[in-house]
Image (tube, grey):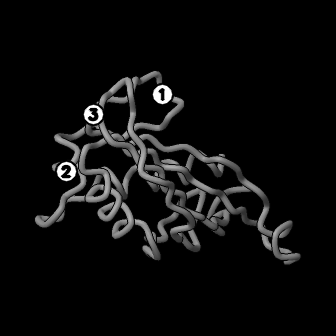
Amino acid sequence: DLMQSVDELLMTRLAGDNSVTGNLQTLLGGSGRIWHSHQLQLPVVGCVTYFSESNVPSAVLRGENVEGQVEFYMLHIFHNQYNVVLDRIYNLLHNYRFPTTPGDVAVKSCAWEWTGPDEFDEALECGAKRVRFKIESVRSAQSPI
């Protein structure tokens, strides 16, 4: 499943951030605070949830004969310093060249697409922010038929 693989690549990139300056997990207050929104996990202050809003074959968008797809991933940040977290996520994902490894999927591009307004989550009593990335992926040539 192509979407599953993109989810895994995204999660690996976000959870694997171990930069000394602005490490995402440190900003969130610990590891295990990045969830796919389909997981049965209630948001907490200091977390990020993400999900694919849509996936469309890229040929539909550009009229090309390409076996790939475009997905829009929405990330929802729950944090009192959401702009600091947003900046870190932007730096991790925007124009990041995902490594191409033998597997099901290769990410051709990942680009920032939209940032929502400043929000406040009443239930958590903290700031919230949404950001969307456009991810183009293609099935890896090495994958079995």
Question: Within the image, what quadrant is residue 46 found in?
Answer: top left
- Asked which secondary structure carries label 1, the reply is loop
**7 left or right, relative to 69:** left
The kind of residue on which mark 3 rests is: Val
Q: Position of residue 65 (x, y in %)?
A: 86, 75
The Cα atoms of the two marked residues, 2 and 1, are separated by: 22 Å
Q: Looking at the picture, how far across and down is residue 76, in whole percent?
A: 45, 45
Please tell me whether mark 2 or mark 1 is closer to you in this view.
Answer: 2
- The residue where tag 1 is placed is 39
Viewer-nearest residue: 145 or 95: 95
What type is the residue that disc 2 sits on?
Answer: Leu
Q: Is residue 60 left or right of residue 11?
A: right
How far apart marks 3 and 1 lie (CA) works out to: 17 Å
- Residue that appears at 13% across and 66% down: 21
Structural distance between the alpha carbons of marks 3 and 2: 11 Å
Q: Which residue is mark 2?
A: 27
The part of the image, by quadrant, that contains residue 48 is: top left
Q: Residue at x 35, y 66 (%)?
A: 92
Mark seen at residue 45? 3
The residue at 41%/24% (across/down) is 41
